Amino acid sequence: MADALKSITLRRLAVGTVVVLGAGYVLAFFAAPEDADQGFIQKIFYLHVPLATVALCGWIVAAIHAIRHLRTGDPKHDARSYVSIHISVIFGLAVLLTGAIWAKGSWGVWWEWKEPTLVSFLIVFLLYATYYPLRYAIEDRDRQARYASVFAITAGAFVPLNFLAVRLAEPLIHPRTFSSTGGLPDSMLWPFLVCMAGMALLWATLVWFELDSKAASGNLKRIRRALEATA
Amino acid sequence: MTAYSALLRKDLRVELRTLRSLPAMALFAITAFVIFRFGLDRERLSGELAAGVLIPTLLFAALLAINRLFVAEREEGGFDLIRLAPVDRTVLFAAKASALVVYLVVLELVAVPIFALFFLDSASGLLPLALVLLLANVGLAATGTVISTIATMSSARDLLAPLILLPLLVPLVVAAAGAGEHLLAEGGPDYGRFGTWLGLLGLYDLIFLLVGYATFDFLLDD
């Protein structure tokens, strides 16, 4: 198992992402039946829902990294927490955009305040958007990392609570993906699950890439400083 | 326990002597009610409109105190003294959160009767509303203390606390306004879903007290 994990490189992960995500959308467009009720616009479901699920899971992953950072004090975990939040915020923006397009296509409005899933997601997104001003307002490296971790944990605990609160406040019209009553037929479920796996791989690839690029630019800066010192 | 009561008494005494937060909070709330009086052009409020004026006003007034919560510690070196003192640092979290709850209760004792005088026909919903506000105060104090510490130590200071807190407090506002809407309904309080909202407030309080308790130590490390 450990050897198998070690053999995964960024390049292999990226290739895997392209294959799985590509297969997912081929299945979604050609194999999955068209929705009887919503027609072609329902295909955005295979993009919107995986994006949203992966973004939310990414924020929870960021909270777990943050806990590990506070426990160990290792800046590696802070970097992972930071990049997880960062990529999830980008995914979150895409969720809001695709959600608005889907809402316009199927409900006839760009935004629906009565719909708890939309509103909860917007609130969570707004909260994570404040992560950047928070990080950049603290200059001391260690303190920045520690405070960012405390934020990531607080916000991670907030995500499920917020969904619960907003859901209690409003009625439901948003479709439930895995509801106990029926849910998706198999012909739609399989393409959807492949898209979900592909999106999770995409998230992991982007996080890995961003971490590598951050590490590389950090090394570059160190080398440049050393060169300037000797020159 | 002695450290806790010493810190709490210190905070309350400082507030009594300097009156830095409480009069400003009360004045802010009252002025906001007057603004709503003209903004909405209504003399009587009930139901969701009443809750929608009262709860956000109290929230914004609370932000004034949250912004100032650690100013004395930062300016007079109180953080260093806590670090030097042989006490558990989470004591500071407990003391500050308790002080904030006291400020909020005092604010509500002033602002809610004035709100009732300005806008309400009957005061019968106020007693159950007090329970809702008390639970909301605990949650507000828990998140407020953590975020205030972060904001106080950052260079953005007053800017950061409202920015982070407003989305973070949405579940509290949802629950308090949801309960308030029924309690302030026209023709007397209605206890529809009262238990649900109290449960949600309690859950919020519990989660963020635990988060604050678990993380506060790391905010004071240096």
Image (cartoon, coloured by chain):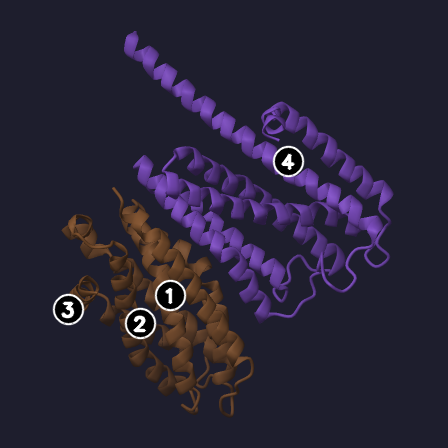
The answer to whether the residues at label 3 and label 1 have Cβ atoms under 8 Å apart is: no
Give the chain letter for purple. Answer: A
Give the chain letter for brown. Answer: B
Query: Cα distance, mark 2 to mark 4?
Result: 46 Å
| Residue, disc 3 | B13
Helix, strand or loop for disc 1 = helix
Mark 3 crowdedness (10 Å alpha carbons): few <14, some 14-19, many ≥20: few
In this picture, is A38 found above or below B56? above
Quadrant (top left, top right, bottom left, bottom right) of the N terminus of chain A:
top right
Residue B21's disc number: none
Helix, strand or loop for disc 3 = helix
Q: Going from the N terminus, do you reach mark 3 or mark 1 first? A: 3
| Residue, disc 1 | B140
Percent coordinates x, y for residue A39 in the rendering: 83, 53
Residue B46: tell me if it is visible. Answer: no
Quadrant (top left, top right, bottom left, bottom right) of the C terminus of chain A:
top left
Helix, strand or loop for disc 2 = helix
| Residue, disc 2 | B104
Q: Going from the N terminus, do you reach mark 3 or mark 2 first? A: 3
| Residue, disc 4 | A202
